Amino acid sequence: MTLDDIRRMDRAVITPAIAAQVLGCDPAYIRVAARDAPEQLGFPVVRIGSRTKIPREAFVRYMEGGRT
């Protein structure tokens, strides 16, 4: 999965697994950071119970160097 693939999606949110492919990290790192220190991620996250979702458009802006 690439950032271009994420840009072309029509979903409102992506999972940590998808974001991790672009960031080059383990999805668990994103999940733990979303739970313990979401402000340090640089992009917004939504926690619903144990689930973590990432607004797709905000993630793309973050990856392009923009503000979320």
Image (cartoon, rainbow, N blue to C red):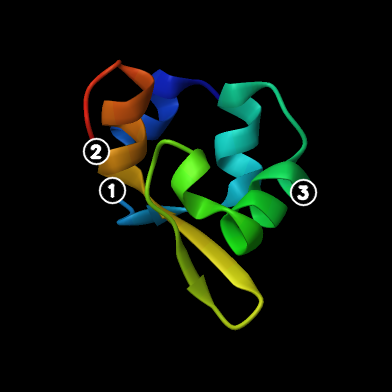
Nearer the observer: mark 1 or 3; the answer is: 3
Query: Label 1 belongs to which residue?
Result: 10
| Mark 3 residue type | Ala
Question: Which residue is identified by label 3?
Answer: 28
Q: Nearer the viewer, residue 61 or 2?
A: 61
Q: Is residue 61 above or below residue 37?
A: above
| Mark 2 crowd level (few <14, some 14–19, many ≥20, 10 Å Cα) | some
Q: Pick the residue in front: 13 or 31.
A: 31
Spatial CA distance of label 1 from label 2 is 18 Å
Q: CA distance from mark 1 to mark 3?
A: 24 Å
Q: Earlier in the sequence, mark 2 or mark 3?
A: 3
Residue to which mark 2 is pinned? 68
Residue drawn at x 51%, y 53% is 38
- Percent across and percent down for residue 68 are 24, 38
Residue 34, x across and y down, in percent: 58, 56
Inter-mark Cα distance, 2 to 3: 22 Å
Determine which of the numbered discs, if any, sits on residue 19 in the image.
none
Mark 1 nearby-residue class (10 Å; few <14, some 14–19, many ≥20): few
Q: Earlier in the sequence, mark 1 or mark 2?
A: 1
Residue 21 is left or right of residue 7, and the answer is: right
Q: Residue at x 50, y 39 (%)?
A: 41
Residue 15 x, y percent position in the rendering:
55, 53
